[in-house]
Image (cartoon, rainbow, N blue to C red):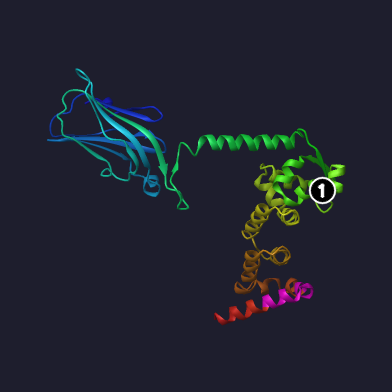
Amino acid sequence: MTESAYRVETTARLAQWRIDNLASCTYRKSDPFKIGNWNWHLSVEKNRVLYIKLYPEISNLTRDNPPIASFIIRVVCSAGDRKAFTHPEIKDKQLKSNEDFVWPIEVPLTGKFIIDVEFLDLKTASPNGGEPCSIWAEGLTQKQSNATALACLGRMLTQSIHTDIIINASNGSIGAHRAVLSARSPVFHSMFSHNLQEKELSTINISDMSIEACQALLCYIYGNIKHEEFLAHRLALLRAADKYDISDLKEACHESLLEDIDTKNVLERLQNAALYQLPKLKSSCMRYLVRFGKIYDIRDDFNAFLQCADRDQITDIFHEVLNTWKGF
């Protein structure tokens, strides 16, 4: 039997398996073929009844995220008048194993025939428990649109395309767009909606930020900040996010500051947690200092910190010590 006897021809959403001869009491399984994110198989088993199966190849992807398929499957006898048998449309059926779709055909088939599968849709379960998502409808168009829009926003900033506001940082200036700033920050929106200096002079003075940190802030707002740039200016970005009420940036800084607490930065981060009301950062710093005993590694710095700390911070540390001792 030739290798072509097992090969399935495919286009983006169509699969065809041509079978030249299927003797009685015979089982045949196709080579794998790719449709969507999965490799698939067709199989036929002929006894008194012809059984046709369609199923995804077993893999980690199939186990973790099995396809939810909508398709039309037909069998076309290629000899004579080309009789066709069509299964009723399958709608949103989850396929995990070779028993999930079995089509018994009781009409005897002889000679050459074609199994034709037209995939109407392929979905995966939503990770948050919502409606399944189409891999075709969800993906490409929206992703391409988002990527193009972000690239254009980035070029508006980097190439100063029709900028209409100047931001003066502590050591330099940069152009921006009041519409973009207003959309991302209610504070900026308020500045440009009332007859304030910023609106009249088309300038914003941010004297507590360097031009580099200001550039990072704008890159975040315009959607094209690099990870290294974000890390280098986290504290300045946190301060700006709090000042200009950019909640998603504040949360991004909060989550990032949780990831690399150490003896060199823990006291500064504890101070920032109190200043900007970051409860998870405060809790993590407390645990690091007390539960993990890092107070003893930075005793001199910690004593100096206590001299400047406010009453609430000292009380919180005292309670954390007491709660830790209770656990021993």
Dividing the picture into quadrants, the one containing residue 164 is top right
Quadrant location of the C terminus in the rendered image: bottom right
Residue 20 placement (x, y as % from top left): 21, 23
Residue density around tag 1, few if under 14, some if 14–19, many if 20 or more, within 10 Å = few
Q: Which region shows up in magenta?
A: 304-317
Whether residue 229 appears in magenta in the rendering, the answer is no
* Whether residue 267 is situated above or below residue 220 in the rendered picture: below
Q: Is residue 287 left or right of residue 40?
A: right
Which residue is most to the top? 80
Residue on which disc 1 sits:
194
> Label 1 amino acid?
His
Dividing the picture into quadrants, the one containing residue 181 is top right
Q: Is residue 303 left or right of residue 71?
A: right
Which residue shows up at 62% across the image and 67% down it? 284
Most frequent secondary structure within the magenta stretch: helix
Q: Indicate the secondary structure of the residue bearing disc 1.
A: loop
Which residue shows up at 82% across the image and 48% down it? 194
Which residue is most to the front? 194
Residue 25 placement (x, y as % from top left): 13, 34
Residue 313 placement (x, y as % from top left): 71, 73
* Whether residue 221 is situated above or below residue 324 in the rendered picture: above
